[in-house]
Image (tube, rainbow, N blue to C red):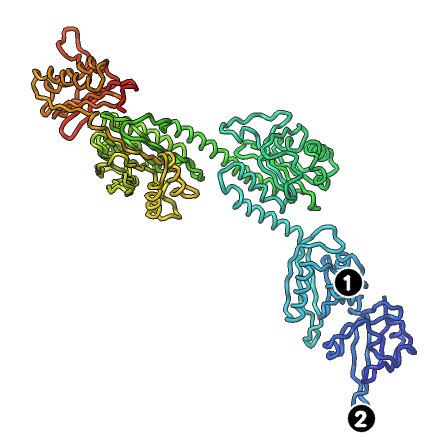
């Protein structure tokens, strides 16, 4: 629209004194109505002070018909004959330069949104794209302030703030936002460059800007950021369900308004048994999430099995091994929504806005584990090709994490089953000690460790208490623990002293390491504590191989750690193990444990040991209750290793349960010994055992006199079994042999073995002891 130049003259007081035809055509006021009026009366708003000072600027005048008209004014001061001010000559024209130049055409036809603002953030020019974005023609915005043309939102405030900064500082600015626009039906990402516009003298006239629609780049960055987030957020634990939940948390709400993860039944079990897909696919819901609180869109509850029809997108995605995208209006989408509405009618209102869904198979290591479904309802954009690529990458990462969790659960279950099969299942009544124990497997990502404990009955009513820990985790450590546990029982059966037993066990570990050519040699390091308690002497002999010292609670409440030399861990070799012996009053409690109870990277070991000693003195009605008290007080909140705890309360055999005779090394005295034994059995009320006991005593004492060395001693112990022990000074141990028909001897030990429940020999500091046990009926046990 062409306008001729308009000119008006004003006196020094701002009264109009002249009015041209161009001014009439611009404003609608004829000269007769304009001349003589104050120029301020013709304005639609006040003029800024800086515009008055500069004698130029854009103002909004009120047209004669009442509509505002934006005009660019330039004033020139007039002087009178005396040189004083006589008024002003004002020229007016529509804002903006001539539009016929190449530069003007380039501005108008630019592919990006371009605008020009004055220093008060009022529109001076807009190109065609800017008008399309705003949804109104240029004439409707010229002269209006930016804040009046948009909603009062955070992104609008940020835009206006940057405009003002350019006008105030004269420096260019960049502003990035993700928002909608009046004429756009969805949000877009914008990168806006703003720069100052100056005249030839360098004076700041306004602000120019160019806004780039960077939506594609924005979503590409968002997808990349989601993948980075997924790498850190998915698989933080080796819990399968938690891993699925983390996948849902990553995609909702940034990628989907609703998402679910369904897995095949075998994936959730301990066994690996993938089956071929049938026409229908049964899946168990393990995780789902929504932008709506409570996830009302979900037609399937968590933990529930859902059977997907053969033509449903999830079933097809799993069968075909590719991402399937369905949009509103497509038959597969309509069938899927209808099936969801039938399954969960309460969520029908929330599914009304669903317009795009994606079924992504979860595949890892060539095996399909399940399917993830993403649905958009509030987000207006439908899933496209780039979204499919992103979903494939995200599902691939998530599936590997889910498979890792599945494999870990399977290995953990196997290791736990193996470990439980090796640990003692029950603790039969012991004359020497009352025992209670706890074993808590690790729940860390490292897996089940190799902790173990054992209570082994020994000859003479003694008992061995064992606790150990194999370095490492998983099935290799559990298998090594089983080998060591079996070895300890075998060596205990030989009745070796604690330090000698650990020496033999150390040799075994060295042998295992030398014979293992794989990568699991490091798993074969181990620690062990072996202790033997004798209820007759009330002494505890113990030795350790790199294991923490036990704690002892005396009947008076005094608690302390046993002062002992731990020795090197098993497998080091070449270093001795030292035995420690201490006397314990009856009723003392010995606490053996593995390092998982007191050691943690965030704890001080000395402080934890002090807590252990305090916890052991807490009142408890039983050893089982005391175990729970100790674990609650001492164990870390999230133990990173297995925890084994074994408590043993000592008992003592009374003097009336033990009888000892010194034996003269002369066969003629054997008969007298038999008579004394018979008398003692009568005193104990064990006449029924007299015949067998006389034969055993006669054979063992005779052998000691004939083949052993003085001093010779006979001891009877009455407990749940009747124990006969004969000691002599010779270290040579007897052994069973088969006597021939005409041999005069060689049948004695065979007879002992046949008549008693078990028999054996053990080395002592002065020689050896041969022993034999006969079980007693419960009604003959000591009170």
Where 358 falls versus 270 (above or below)?
A: below
Question: Does residue 563 appear in this view?
Answer: yes
Task: Determine the CA span between mark 1 and mark 2.
Answer: 48 Å
Question: Does residue 750 appear in this view?
Answer: no
Q: Residue at x 57, y 30 (%)?
A: 264
Left or right for 381, reference 434? right
Q: Which residue is mark 2?
A: 82
What label sits on residue 531 in the rendered view? Answer: none
Q: Quadrant of residue 127?
A: bottom right
Where 529 falls versus 733 (above or below)?
A: below
- Front one among 510 and 741: 741
N-terminal of the pair, mark 1 or mark 2, is 2
Left or right for 312, reference 543? right
Residue 104 position in % (x across, y down) = 77, 65
Q: Count all numbered tags in the image, as a single digit.
A: 2
Q: Which residue is mark 1?
A: 105
Q: Quadrant of residue 571?
A: top left
Q: Residues within 10 Å of mark 2 (few under 14, many from 20)?
A: few
Residue 736 position in % (x across, y down) = 20, 16
Q: Quadrant of residue 311?
A: top right
Q: Nearer the viewer, mark 1 or mark 2?
A: 2
Q: Residues within 10 Å of mark 1 (few under 14, many from 20)?
A: few
Residue 109 position in % (x across, y down) = 76, 59
Quadrant assignment for the C terminus: top left
Q: Residue at x 12, y 20 (%)?
A: 704
Where 10 falls versus 475 (above or below)?
A: below
The local secondary structure at tag 1 comes to helix
Quadrant assignment for the N terminus: bottom right
Where 261 falls versus 759 (above or below)?
A: below
């Amino acid at each position: 629209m062409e306008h001729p130049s308009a000119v008006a003259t004003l006196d020094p007081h701002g009264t109009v004194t002249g009015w041209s035809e161009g001014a009439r055509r611009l404003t609608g006021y004829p000269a007769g109505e304009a001349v003589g009026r104050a120029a301020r009366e013709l304005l639609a708003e006040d003029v800024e002070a800086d515009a008055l000072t500069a004698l130029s600027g854009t103002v909004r005048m009120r047209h004669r018909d009442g509509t505002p008209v934006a005009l660019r004014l330039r004033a020139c001061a007039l002087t009178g004959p005396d040189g004083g001010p006589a008024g002003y000559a004002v020229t007016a024209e529509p804002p903006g330069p001539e539009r016929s130049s190449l530069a003007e055409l380039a501005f108008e036809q630019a592919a990006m949104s371009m605008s020009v603002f004055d220093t008060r953030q009022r529109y001076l020019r807009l190109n065609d794209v800017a008008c399309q974005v705003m949804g109104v023609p240029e004439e409707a915005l010229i002269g209006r302030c930016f804040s009046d043309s948009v909603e009062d939102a955070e992104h609008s405030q940020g835009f206006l703030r940057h405009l003002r900064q350019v006008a105030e500082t004269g420096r260019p600015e960049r502003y990035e936002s993700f928002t909608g626009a009046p004429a756009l039906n969805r949000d877009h990402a914008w990168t806006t460059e703003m720069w100052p516009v100056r005249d030839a003298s360098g004076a700041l006239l306004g602000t120019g800007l160019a806004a780039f629609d960077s939506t594609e780049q924005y979503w590409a960055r968002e997808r990349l950021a989601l993948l980075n987030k997924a790498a850190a957020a998915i698989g933080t634990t080796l819990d399968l369900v938690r891993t699925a939940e983390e996948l849902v948390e990553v995609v909702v709400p940034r990628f989907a308004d609703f998402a679910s993860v369904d897995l095949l039944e075998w994936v959730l079990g301990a066994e690996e048994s993938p089956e071929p897909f049938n026409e229908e696919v049964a899946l168990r819901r393990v995780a789902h999430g929504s932008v709506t609180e409570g996830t009302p869109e979900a037609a399937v509850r968590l933990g529930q099995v859902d059977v997907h029809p053969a033509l449903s997108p999830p079933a097809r995605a799993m069968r075909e091994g590719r991402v399937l995208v369905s949009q509103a209006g497509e038959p597969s989408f309509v069938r899927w929504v209808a099936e969801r509405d039938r399954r969960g009618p309460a969520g029908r209102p929330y599914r009304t806005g669903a317009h795009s869904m994606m079924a992504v198979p979860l595949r890892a290591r060539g095996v399909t584990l399940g399917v993830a479904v993403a649905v958009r309802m509030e987000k207006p954009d439908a899933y496209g090709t780039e979204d499919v690529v992103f979903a494939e990458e995200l599902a691939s990462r998530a599936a590997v994490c889910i498979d890792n969790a599945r494999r870990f659960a399977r290995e953990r279950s196997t290791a736990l089953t193996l470990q439980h099969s090796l640990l003692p299942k029950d603790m039969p009544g012991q004359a020497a000690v009352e025992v209670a124990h706890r074993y808590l497997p690790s729940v860390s990502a490292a897996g089940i460790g190799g902790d173990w404990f054992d209570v082994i009955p020994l000859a003479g009513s003694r008992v061995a208490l064992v606790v150990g820990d194999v370095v490492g985790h998983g099935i290799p450590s559990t298998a090594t623990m089983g080998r060591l546990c079996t070895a300890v029982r075998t060596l205990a059966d030989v009745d070796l002293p604690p330090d000698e037993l650990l020496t033999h066990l150390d040799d075994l570990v060295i042998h295992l390491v030398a014979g293992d050519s794989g990568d699991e040699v490091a798993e074969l390091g181990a620690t062990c504590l072996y202790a033997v308690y004798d209820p007759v002497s009330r002494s505890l002999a113990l030795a350790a191989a790199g294991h923490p010292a036990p704690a002892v609670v005396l009947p008076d409440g005094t608690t302390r750690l046993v002062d002992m030399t731990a020795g090197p861990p098993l497998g080091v070799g070449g270093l001795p193990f030292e035995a420690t012996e201490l006397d314990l009053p009856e009723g003392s409690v010995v606490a053996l444990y593995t390092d998982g109870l007191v050691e943690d990277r965030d704890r001080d070991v000395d402080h934890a040991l002090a807590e252990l000693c305090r916890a052991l003195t807490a009142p408890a009605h039983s050893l089982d209750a005391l175990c729970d008290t100790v674990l609650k007080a001492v164990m870390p909140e999230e133990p990173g290793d297995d925890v084994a705890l074994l408590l043993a309360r000592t008992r003592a055999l009374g003097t009336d349960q033990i009888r000892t005779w010194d034996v003269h090394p002369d066969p003629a005295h054997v008969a007298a010994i038999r008579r004394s034994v018979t008398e003692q059995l009568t005193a104990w009320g064990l006449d029924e055992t007299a015949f067998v006991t006389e034969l055993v005593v006669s054979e063992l004492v005779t052998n000691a006199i004939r083949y052993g060395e003085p001093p010779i001693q006979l001891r009877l112990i009455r407990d749940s079994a009747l124990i006969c022990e004969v000691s002599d000074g010779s270290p040579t141990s007897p052994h069973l042999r088969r006597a021939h028909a005409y041999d005069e001897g060689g049948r004695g030990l065979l007879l002992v073995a046949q008549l008693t429940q078990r028999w054996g020999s053990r080395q002592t500091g002065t020689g050896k002891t041969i022993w034999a046990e006969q079980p007693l009926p419960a009604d003959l046990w000591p009170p």
